[in-house]
Image: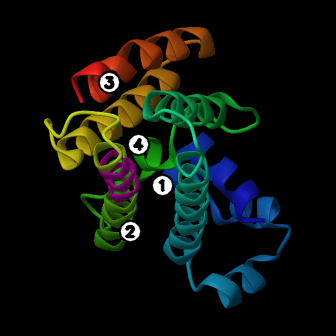
Amino acid sequence: MLDRVRGVFMAKGFSGASLDDLAAAAALNRPSLYAAFGDKEGLYLHTLQRYGDQSVAGMESIFSRKLPIAQRLGQIYKAAIALYTAPPHSPGCMIINTAAVEAPTHPKIAAAAGKLLADIEAVFEKAFARAVAEKEIAALPSPATRARLAGGIFDTLAVRARIGSSPAELRAFAQSMVPAICGDARAA
């Protein structure tokens, strides 16, 4: 149900999504929706949390594979591109497309989105720290710096998807950035 609701938020934004739109997507009447989530912001926060939990779990699964870090990072970006361009949702990422717009006037949305971004960076940082410990990549730049770069590319892919870049264009962009983030493994 929250995935269907996410589609409404992605298509119309937080402010543009009416309670009738959201109730229809949730297959609940408005009183049931209020009883379950309190208000539209509560429903949005639950939807964002689910989106974030799924994203972090997917990243952790890919990073746990026994592949070179550059390949795992490439797979992370491929998964993000698939999510960002998959119908029936509007292209892009829920954080970039909706939370960033609402954050200035909705502190709870800003806090939830900030936590999700920090969680994503933490997953990246842990993967890069493991690659450094295994001497797969150089210690500099630091795992934290690489994590911020990798997260920035995540965000850029979402923006590019939202403005209409094709999946092929997004994949080419991501593939061009992986060596810049991972560095030359021979330098490790």
178, 14: nearer the viewer: 178
Q: Earlier in the sequence, mark 1 or mark 2?
A: 1
User: Is residue 48 rendered to the left or right of residue 141?
Assistant: right
Q: Give the residue at mark 1.
A: 15
| Front position among marks 2 and 3 | 3
Secondary structure state at the residue bearing disc 2? helix
Outermost residue to the right = 27
Camera-near label (3 vs 4) is: 3
Q: Secondary structure at mark 3?
A: helix
Image coordinates of residue 188 in percent, x first then y, are 24, 30
Q: Amino acid at mark 2?
A: Ala
73 versus 60 height, above or below: above
Residue picked out by circle 4: 96
User: Where does the magenta region start and end?
Assistant: 121-130
Is disc 4 surrounded by few (<14), some (14 to 19) or many (20+) residues within 10 Å? some
Task: Report, in whole angstroms, how far the alpha carbon at label 4 lies from the one at label 1.
Answer: 15 Å
What label does residue 185 carry, if any?
3
- Depth check, front residue: 110 or 17: 110
Q: Nearer the viewer, mark 3 or mark 1?
A: 3
Q: Which residue is mark 2?
A: 112
Give the residue drawn at x 68%, y 48%.
Answer: 7
Which amino acid type is marked by label 1? Ser
Q: Residue at x 56, y 53 (%)?
A: 55
